[in-house]
Image: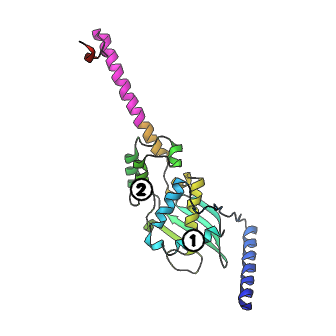
Amino acid sequence: MWDDEEDKQEQKQRLERELERRRKQGATLVPVEVPKSTKLARQFWGQAWQRHLEGYADYASRLPQGRSYLRQGHVFDLAINEGLVTAIVTGQTIYDVQVRIKPLDEERWEHLQSQCSGRVGSLLDLLAGKLGDGVMKLVTDPCEGLFPQPKEIKVICTCPDWADLCKHAAAVLYAIGLRFDAQPELFFKLRGVDSSVLVRGASSALNAQVLSTDAAQIASDDLADVFGIDLTYDVSTDK
């Protein structure tokens, strides 16, 4: 028992020394804030990311450990960029974690744009997840939607665990979902796509509809001028 206590104390001191060394090298060591509620993610994109991860059978054994690690405040300096997430995770020592994700396949992205065309009202609605059920099903579809497949995710951790997913990386995966809660635009950045394209598709469809209506009205007005008749006359009212 005494040896165990000595080991824990030595481990704590070693960790503090390593943290101090990192600070001197410029690391900010900002912890990922975790809500005190029973749910980790509480907004649309964070929850969708979490559900998607939990659908991976290969991750099932490590995700619960990752949730616990995240809740215990072990994840620091989470950074999300196009195709890459980095973080520092503390344990017996400090581990550097990278999550590399392939950009969304161009063909799949174009297909989604086509399917969603005219159905996304605004960028704010898109980022808030305030979409119709049809669009939600499209973007969250496990195979054809915006989320990466397991083969598109490569996890690298400096810990000695050689499993496909260690608990440190699992904690980072969950932390990503929390960041999406606060900054949903980072999801699209991570996947390497421009979210505004989906909104522009809606604008184009609306403009096309307006132009079509305007053209019909102009044609009607021109004919009325030429023939001196009112083309808006409703024949159903003629008795």
Looking at marks 1 and 2 on the same chain, the residue that comes earlier in the sequence is marked by: 1
Residue located at (69% from left, 63% from top): 30
- Circle on res. 66: 1
**Badge 2 amino acid:** Gly
The vertical placement of 217 against 100, above or below, is above
- The answer to whether the residues at label 1 and label 2 have Cβ atoms under 8 Å apart is no
Residue of label 2:
145
Q: Main secondary structure of the magenta part?
A: helix
Q: Residue 182 appears in which quarter of the rendering?
A: bottom right
Residue located at (37% from left, 47% from top): 115
Q: What SS does tag 2 mark?
A: loop
Q: In 3D space, how far apart are the residues under numbered discs 1 and 2 (Cα atoms)? A: 25 Å
Does the magenta run of residues contain 223? yes
- Pointer 1 local density, CA inside 10 Å: few below 14, some 14–19, many at least 20: many
Looking at the rendering, the stretch of residues picked out in magenta corresponds to 205-233
Query: In front: 232, or 113?
Result: 232
Residue 17: give x, y in percent of width and height. Answer: 75, 76
Residue 135: give x, y in percent of width and height. Answer: 42, 48
